[in-house]
Structure formats: C-alpha cells, structure tokens
Image (spheres, rainbow, N blue to C red):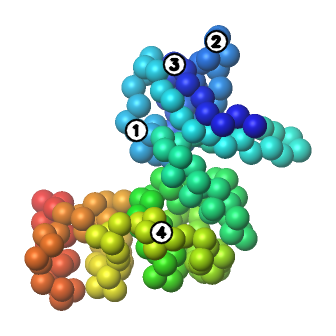
Amino acid sequence: MIASIEGNVTQILEDSLVITVSGIGFKVYVPSNVSRDVELHHVIALYTYLSVKEDSLTLFGFETIEERDMFLLLLSANGVGPRTALAILSTLSLDIVCNAVIQEQADVFSRVSGVGKKTAQSIVLQLQGKVKKGSASPLAAIKDVDGDVISALTSLGYSVVEAQTALQMIPKDAPDDLESRIRLALQYFS
C-alpha cells in the first residue's frame, strides 16, 4: 500500500497530477481544489489511497488525512466508487459532507454530478454513526433555508461549489427568510 507521496509536480491535468519521485512519474487523481491550487515544478506531499483492480492500479491523493479518511468512508457506501467519492470531495467541503450525513440531507449529495438520488440516500444511510458530530464544525451546519438557497442558486445555473461559497459569504446576522438569503447570496456574484 502506498500511504503517501512526495515529489515534484511535472504535469497538471484536469483531474490528476503527475508527481515525479526519483525519476518515476506517478499519475495521482486529486480533488479539484488540489489540481487548481498546485503549481508546476513545485514539490507536493499528498496522503494517498491505492485502488487495486484486476486491470489497473489507480492512485488517489489528498492534502489532509481527514480528506483521505472521508474518501475511504464514502467508498464504504454502496454504489460509491473511487471516481464518485473523488467527485463528492471535489464539490463539497468536509464540513458539508459531515453535516449532510448527520442531518440526513441526501439532496446535498444528489447535487454532485454523477450521484443519483438512490446513491445519495445510500451514502446518508450507510455513513450514519460513522461520521461523528464533532467531525464537522457547528458553524457549517446546513439549515433547511440554506439548503433551499443552494437549490435556488443551482437552478439559476451556478455550480454547487459557487452556491456554497456564496452561502458562506452571507453575514451571520442576516435574516433567516429565504428571499433575503437568496438576495444576499446573489450579491456575492455581482
């Protein structure tokens, strides 16, 4: 098992990096935030998971142990393979994943590309009890109204990541009614 990798980034692809270690280039699939923030020809260290199948060995890399552990938890749910788990971690923050499981909000997962309603419900059901309440910050809890704000923004064409970012920019003392919160979220984009 390859637990971690540290090396020079020699190629940045859409969903992966090529990390050269002692002259050998390893293709490592990473969440989108990692490939977006990394710089070419800089040293990077990632915690990894090696997926072994009959016809392939695939390496997945994460910036933190917590991300890798959540990836492994997601893999334990029926219908979730490595690519789907990576898509979830590319779209949703760890706090949002934890809170969606704790609060049984399967619709949060179904907004991720490639995750259907059945898979989303499976994730919530099978991760119940495995995700601890302390593993996500209480500030990141998704209120029902905030779930509606995310739905409204995604129906307007914004991505889930953009909608979550706009939601986080809403002041803490903002009113809790849906219309006000949508208006404040839309101000983020202007």
Please give the name of the residue rendered at 28% of the width and 60% of the height, measured from the top-left corner.
165
On the question of residue 92 being in view, the answer is no
Label 4: how many Cα within 10 Å (few below 14, some 14–19, many 20+): many
Q: Quadrant of residue 142?
A: bottom left
Which mark, residue 98? 4
- The residue that disc 2 covers is 22
**Element class at badge 3:** strand
Q: Earlier in the sequence, mark 3 or mark 1?
A: 3
Please give the name of the residue rendered at 62% of the width and 39% of the height, measured from the top-left corner.
48
Please give the name of the residue rendered at 60% of the width and 29% of the height, measured from the top-left corner.
5
Say whether marks 3 and 4 touch (CB < 8 Å). Answer: no
Q: Earlier in the sequence, mark 3 or mark 4?
A: 3
On the question of residue 174 being in view, the answer is yes
Q: Which is in the foreground here, disc 3 or disc 4?
A: 4
- The residue that disc 3 covers is 8
- The residue that disc 1 covers is 36
Position in image of residue 95 (x %, y %): 41, 64
Q: Earlier in the sequence, mark 3 or mark 2?
A: 3
Q: Earlier in the sequence, mark 2 or mark 1?
A: 2
Q: Which is in the foreground here, disc 3 or disc 1?
A: 3
At label 1, which amino acid type do we have?
Answer: Arg
Q: Residue furthest front?
A: 134
46 relative to 167 in the view: left or right: right
At label 3, which amino acid type do we have?
Answer: Asn
Q: Quadrant of the C terminus?
A: bottom left
Measured Cα–Cα span from mark 4 to mark 1:
23 Å
Measured Cα–Cα span from mark 2 to mark 1:
24 Å
